[in-house]
Image (spheres, rainbow, N blue to C red):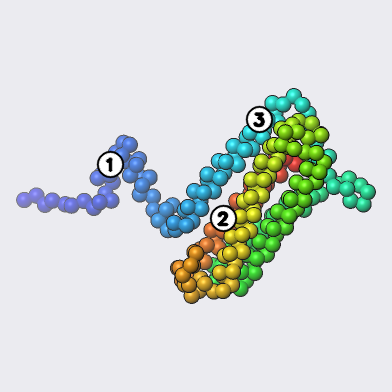
Amino acid sequence: MTESIERPVHDPLLRPTGLRGVAADLSSDQRAFKNVSWGKAMMWIFLLSDTFIFGCFLLAYMTARMSTNVPWPNPSEVFALRIGGQEIPLILIAIMTFVLISSSGTMAMAVNFGYRRDRRKTAVLMLATAALGATFVGMQAFEWTKLITEGVRPWGNPWGAAQFGSSFFMITGFHGTHVSIGVIFLLIIARKVWRGDFDHGRRGFFTSRKGHYEIVEIMGLYWHFVDLVWVFIFAFFYLW
């Protein structure tokens, strides 16, 4: 009498082959998706779509700059500040970059203390990040005011190619909007952390799960993305 042996489901001999096998391998990947929360997954999807948008903007900027026959404005002249009777090129941009990169460090520390459930240090570091972000937006507003006063418009500027104004205001304005939104959310989440909403599971926006500081990490993902985008904007607009 032949004894039938039942093979386990994970037996390689029972796995589908061909395209069905490829689909089965991709859908069975537990390491990448099993432990990822809905909020974090949605943030990654949002950042991926935002990367596409910023990439299109920067590609359009490069195309406009390389296709124009009119000389492109010199960043060292356009973004110079007169301090003590001397023109110092890119000094404001350097300070803005330092401020935004520093905010990335305070945000990383806030996430670290969030993992430890140290709500006071987490809230203080998030407030410091928001303050640095607001400082960046304020300096960007000063930069816009200076350029508008000097005659830069979306349709022209006194230094050369007319496309400079439209591409500059569109890309830096889009990035500045991201920073401003981030500052608002940092203040909201920092207030909730300071009140202990995550410790007590108080019902509300992002606070219904007791003991979870995951929203701090999600805000960190967003903020680091904003900082990374600025690095590319800095290289394309101010160093090229």
Residue labelled with disc 1: 16
Crowd band around label 3 with a 10 angstrom C-alpha radius: few (<14), some (14–19), many (20+): few
Q: Secondary structure at mark 3?
A: helix
Nearer to us of marks 1 and 3 is 3
The C terminus, quarter of image: top right
Instruction: Relative to 56, say whether 26 is above or below.
Output: below
Residue labelled with disc 2: 221
Please count the marks in the image. 3
Label 1, label 3: how far apart the Cα atoms are:
47 Å
User: Residue 77 at what x, y percent from top left?
Assistant: 83, 39
Q: Secondary structure at mark 1?
A: loop
Q: Residue at x 61, y 59 (%)?
A: 184
Is 10 on the left-hand or right-hand side of 167?
Answer: left
Instruction: Relative to 20, say whether 98 is above or below.
Output: below
Is 156 on the left-hand or right-hand side of 190?
Answer: right
Residue type at mark 3 is Thr
Does residue 105 appear in this view? no
Does residue 41 appear in this view? yes
Q: Earlier in the sequence, mark 1 or mark 3?
A: 1
Label 2, label 1: how far apart the Cα atoms are:
38 Å
Residue labelled with disc 3: 63
Q: Residue at x 28, y 51 (%)?
A: 10
Q: Residue furthest right?
A: 85
Residue type at mark 1 is Pro
Q: Earlier in the sequence, mark 2 or mark 1?
A: 1
User: Residue 209 at what x, y percent from top left?
Assistant: 45, 68
Q: Residue at x 42, y 53 (%)?
A: 33
- Which of the 4 image quadrants contains residue 76? top right
